[in-house]
Image (tube, helix red, strand yellow):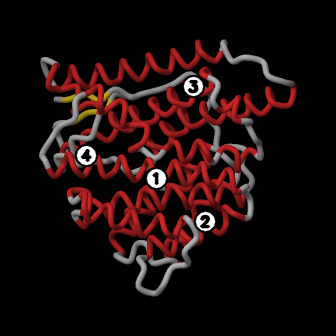
Amino acid sequence: MINYPRLDCPFPSAINPHADAVNNHTLNWVKQFDLVVDEKNFRRLQKSKFGRLAARAYPNAPLEELKLVSDWNTWLFIRDDQCDESGLGKDPIRLSGVHAELLEILLGRAPEKYDSALAHALYDIRSRLLRKASSAWMSRFVYSVIEYFESSVWEAINRADHKIPDTETYILMRPYTGGLYTDIELIDITEDIYLPLHVRKNEVIQRLSLMANNVVCWSNDIISHAKESKYHDVHNLVATLQPAQPSLQHAIDLAAEMTRAEIDAFVELEKQIPAFSAEIDGDVQRYVAILRSWMRGNLDWAYESSRYIVATDDIALEV
């Protein structure tokens, strides 16, 4: 029997008081844009509770800002599922074409009737973001989305070539394939803060952002591995580690050890955050607090959501 250890981290659990309202809003938003038309898939979406992920990651966000985050993350998950179901995730040429359409929308082209439901929903998100964000912030967000799309094509190329990426390359690409850098950009919106360029590019701030990204993505890889391996998806930290390990269990345990070590490194690195100014330092603390909330909140959500459940008698979760 394979044991998947129950992951934890030392940060306090929190959830936004708007959690249920936002979760219901996003389900209605999905229906409004016909993003999920199959009733079985919609029930699966309901059980995934994506609105509660947003509520745990941004526990202090105002209602409207939290709706934006929830809708964006749900859009990402639906796009990912549609790529899997349609075969796009194994066809880099077709996938690049879909991305080209979506980037046109994100850059301002109003969707036509012939455009996909994803495109219409994305235009709605863009319009709502522009009411709250500067053009400079929007450019940064678009750039993060471009990198996410590019990393998705990298995955599609690997699947088409039946290639398992090596661990070093996978770890380099994982922060982009998870799309979490787009969510890190959204901290500015939910917290109503602005970190100047010299602060955003500070080495400590950059490393903390990467570490939080790694913890979220590696945790998801461990929790989702049983489900993903069932569908032979090799884009998973456990899958890349396994060839060099004596067994699958050793690979799972190593991935968990790496995740815990990254959390410990984050805690230590926090102590090295430099002082900038009274106002900036307050914003930095709020920024880092959301990085912590993402690491803890993602775990809390993963264990309450049905997103990664797989039916099997050969797998056990440690509790």
Q: Amino acid at mark 2?
A: Arg
70 shown above or below 219: below
Distance of mark 1 from mark 2, alpha carbons? 14 Å
- For the C terminus, the quadrant is top left
Residue 149 or 296: which is nearer the viewer?
149
The image shows residue 20 at horizontal and vertical percentages of 62, 58
**Quick one: label 4, few (<14), some, or many (20+) residues within 10 Å?**
some
The image shows residue 118 at horizontal and vertical percentages of 44, 70
- Name the residue carrying label 2: 126
Distance of mark 4 from mark 2, alpha carbons? 32 Å
Q: Amino acid at mark 1?
A: Ile
Q: Are marks 1 and 2 in contact (CB under 8 Å)?
A: no
Q: Please, which residue is most extreme toward the right here?
A: 278
Name the residue located 33 percent from the left edge and 71 percent from the top edge. Answer: 40
124 shown above or below 184: below
Q: For this view, does 262 lie left or right of residue 275?
A: left
The nearer-to-camera label among 4 and 3 is: 3
Distance of mark 4 from mark 1, alpha carbons? 27 Å
Q: Earlier in the sequence, mark 4 or mark 3?
A: 3
Res 227 label: 4
Q: Earlier in the sequence, mark 3 or mark 1?
A: 1
- For the N terminus, the quadrant is top left
Residue 226 or 128: which is nearer the viewer?
128
**Quick one: label 2, few (<14), some, or many (20+) residues within 10 Å?**
many
The nearer-to-camera label among 4 and 1 is: 1
The image shows residue 136 at horizontal and vertical percentages of 68, 51
Corner quadrant of residue 47: bottom left
Q: Amino acid at mark 3?
A: Leu
Badge 2 marks a residue whose secondary structure is helix
- Name the residue carrying label 3: 208
